[in-house]
Structures are given as C-alpha cells and as structure tokens.
Image (cartoon, rainbow, N blue to C red):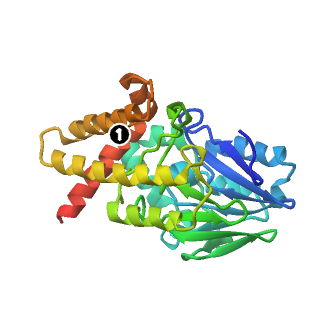
Amino acid sequence: MSVEHGIHTIDTAFQRDHFDAAYLIVQDGRGAFVDCGTSHSLPNLLASVAQAGLQPADIDWLILTHVHLDHAGGAGALMQQLPNARLVVHPRGAQHMIDPARLIAGATAVYGQAEIARSYGQILPVPAERVVVAEGGHRVSLAGRTLECIDTPGHARHHHCIWDEASRSWFTGDTFGLSYRELDSAAGAFIVPTSSPVQFEPEAMHASIERLMARRPEAMYLTHYGRVVDTARLAAELHEQIDAMVVIARRCDGLPQRHQVLVDALAGLYVARLRHLGSSLDENEVRRVLGMDIELNAQGLACWLDRDKR
C-alpha cells in the first residue's frame, strides 16, 4: 500500500489479511503508532519501524483510538519494545491499559481462555508513568506535527479519533465504520457502521461522524481497513445505514430467535446496499467477508435494545 504523508499502513494479521490495521506516522525521523493490534502483531509492527528507516527508540507515541483488544490488546507488549514511547489513551480507557485484568476477564468470559490466547496472545499492562490520559482536544507533537485527540462516542464511550492536520485526515478507529477492499466496486469503497458490543449508541455515533466531517477531511484511515477517500459520500452512507440498523433492531425486538433474525436482516441490508453500488459479489461472498462483523453488529444492536428498555 502506498505511503501518503508519511503514514504507513500495517496489516496486524488479526483474523485474516487486510482485516485489521495499525498505522505508523513518520515525521523528521520520529514515529507515532496509532493503534497496535494484538501481541501477535508485534513482528509486523517492528518490521514497519525498520522499513521506515527508524529504530524502536525513535518512536515517541502509541496513540490508541480505544481499548478494544483488536486495537489495543498488544499495547503492553509493544511498549516493552519502545523505550522512549508514551501511550496516549482516552480517560475511560486508561485504567484498562494500566491494569488489563477486567479486559481479560470480560473477553475470556465471552470467548474462552483458549480463543483469547489464539486470537490475542498475552495482554500485558503498561506502566502508569508511561500513560498519558488524553481528554478531548488533547494534542501531541510528533517532531512538530500535531496529532489531536477528539472524543467520539457511539461505538464505545472511550473512543478517540485522531486528527492529523498535515494530511487533513482522521484516524477513525471504529467510529467511521469499516470498509474492506474486497467490497470495493466501480462506485468506490463500501462502508458499514460497526455497532459491536457493548456500547453502541446511534445518536452519539451520528454526532461523532458529523464532528469528523466538520473539518472537511481529505481521507479517513480506518482500522478495518485502510485509507478511504470520498468521505462525504461515505459519511452519508453511514448515517443512512445507522438509521436502517436501528429500524431493523426495533422490528426484531421480542421475536423468537432474535439474534439469528438480526443476523439475517443485517446481511440482507448490506447485500442490498452493495447491489445499489453495482457490486457483483454474491450473498455468500458478502457473508464471508462481513460474517464476523455482521455477528458483532447483531450482538451490539441487541445490547443497545436491552439497555434502551431500562
């Protein structure tokens, strides 16, 4: 993948190729990571440092969009390899990086110990003195290049997006959805909101997307996956789909086998949207590419429905 504005896209090798990205921003011989994948991602991350002509000691920052394990599970392991780096994280996520016991327990309860080891490897703590708690609007300097953290709830309440004025781009974590290159068509990228458990809030997500678009970005760097442009069209797609997903969720609430009904309805929504863009992929291929995300979106919508009733 080409390097734009000193931004290197790193495939973290989580689950499959081109599914989960971290980024290395290089400026005047200094580096900053945005997200890091899991501890299994460490070889790819360190290789990217070498390929950029840097040493681990040249990395000043590891900035996390949020602390979900596919974005931050390898933070402790990576920080052990970066002697001069500090970790920047949302106030709601900081304690989970310093003491990841609750993160580990929660994930283990859902997936089991064997799956946690297979998918995420070791989840290590980050020393508190190396953690920078970043309120919304917090800025870090990378050799004079400003990276600004903006509070963007909707996917998670501990979510930042990072604005890079030099490239006029956002590093969006999961706030600006997911877009896999297998789903691109002549119309451009296809994008899907991510409502994965357990803090999906549709109105907050709408508002966060509007905050991102207010700066008229030239590109978005998505964790899932890579750089996308045509941001105004993609933002409109996300707004429409968030509303459609809410309608689907409310129609499915109270039905027997609610989860499977949600899964099937979401798959139908995404296939229909792809058809509208002129995609020739059949439904089986769409379900293959989006299967994990459809499952997680169904779970997230169910959590939101149940929370909304209380």
Residue at point 80% right, 71% down? 144
Numbered marks: total: 1
Q: Nearer the viewer, residue 138 or 123?
A: 138
Decide: is 253 above or below 166.
above
Which residue was labeled with disc 1?
295
Where residue 132 appears, as percent x and y from the top left, is 63, 73
Q: Is residue 45 left or right of residue 266?
A: right
Q: Residue at x 36, y 60 (%)?
A: 199
Q: Nearer the viewer, residue 85 or 275?
A: 275
Relative to 38, is 91 above or below? Answer: below
What residue is at 38 percent from the left and 55 percent from the top?
A: 239
Query: 144 and 135: which one is in front?
Result: 144
Left or right of 73 on screen, residue 158: left
- Measured from the top left, where is residue 174 in percent x and y? 49, 53
The local secondary structure at tag 1 comes to: helix
Amino acid carrying mark 1 in the image:
Glu
Q: Is residue 43 above or below residue 202?
A: above
Please provide percent x and percent y for residue 69: 51, 51
The quadrant of the picture occupied by the C terminus is bottom left
Image quadrant containing the N terminus: top right
Write the residue at 70% across / 59% down: 167
* Crowding near the residue tagged with mark 1, few <14, some 14–19, many ≥20 C-alpha atoms within 10 Å: some
Q: Position of residue 87 (x, y in %)?
A: 66, 66
